[in-house]
Every structure is written in C-alpha cells, then in structure tokens.
Image (spheres, rainbow, N blue to C red):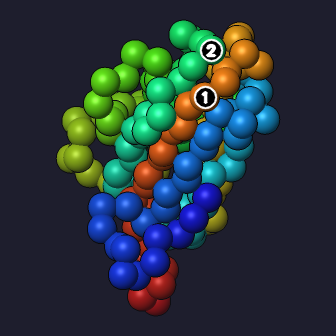
Amino acid sequence: MAKVAINELGAFTDVVRLDFNDLKAIGNGGSLVIAKIPAQGAVELAGVAETVAVVGSSSLVIDVGTTSADPDEFIDALDVDAMTVPVFNTGDQFTSGYSKAVKAVASETEVYVKVTDAAIASITAGEVVIGLRIIDLAKFA
C-alpha cells in the first residue's frame, strides 16, 4: 500500500498494487488491510483495474471495504476475470456513483481487500491496482 506523493496527487490518495503472488498470499477467503481512513475522514472514490490479466483462474473475485468479514462497502463482488475496463464505486455504500463521500468515520478505520477464488493457488500471472480517494478533514483541525 502506498500514499500518493504530493506531486502525484490526482484522483487517488491511496493506491495498492497486488500481483499474483500477493493474491496467492492473501488466499481464498482471506483479507488484507490496504489503507486506513483517518478519524473524521471518509472515502470518496474507489476504483479497481486489472493491469495484468489473471492467468490460471477464471473465478477471482475481490471486495473492498471496512468490514473485515465482508468488506463490500466500496467495491462489491468484483469478478476480476470478467473485467474489460476499470470499475469504480460499486460497493454497498455507494448509491449512485460519485454522488457523495461514503463511510464517514469518527475514529481511524482499516480498509480491507478480500479475495475469493477456489483456484487461487493455480494463478501464475496477474495484477490488480486498487485506488482510493480518502478525505481527511482532521488534518485541518
């Protein structure tokens, strides 16, 4: 996971790149913390791109959100193998795309990616990039 440097600042504040080895390490049904929403913060944008095609599986699904058991607030049940373009704001908390920031928090909150793929051990190539735009109002306090 990486914070975006000021000179790179654009649509995203946090970006994580997971290659096939990272996905295998997370494992089927496993989760990984990829970012933190600061206290008094929220998520405004969540996006996923398959930057290298997944090879060795046709059932890779990811979720992104704050509930460790079922993190689907920002990206919900994304079938990575079926992607042809990046996907944005498909989670349960987003009701109409970019209409509003979601998941405002009072205290620091972890953001997870969850991997579901019964054939995860067979993956031999692939890369997924996840971007988040996190609002941090407390930095102005």
Q: Earlier in the sequence, mark 2 or mark 1?
A: 2
The residue that appears at 74% across and 30% down in the rendered structure is 24
Please say if the residues under marks 2 and 1 sit with CB atoms less than 8 Å apart.
Answer: yes
- From this view, report whether residue 9 is shown above or below residue 1: below
Sort mark 2 into few (<14), some (14-19) or many (20+) by Cα contacts within 10 Å.
some
Q: Which residue is mark 2?
A: 56
The residue that appears at 40% across and 82% down in the rendered structure is 6
| Residue in front for this viewpoint, 25 or 12 | 25
Q: Position of residue 113 (x, y in %)?
A: 61, 39
Q: Which residue is mark 1?
A: 125
The residue that appears at 30% across and 61% down in the rendered structure is 11
For residue 94, side relative to residue 114 (left or right): left
* SS under mark 1: strand
| Alpha carbon separation for disc pair 2 and 1 | 7 Å
Q: Would residue 97 be visible to someone looking at this image?
A: yes
* SS under mark 2: loop
The residue that appears at 55% across and 49% down in the rendered structure is 17
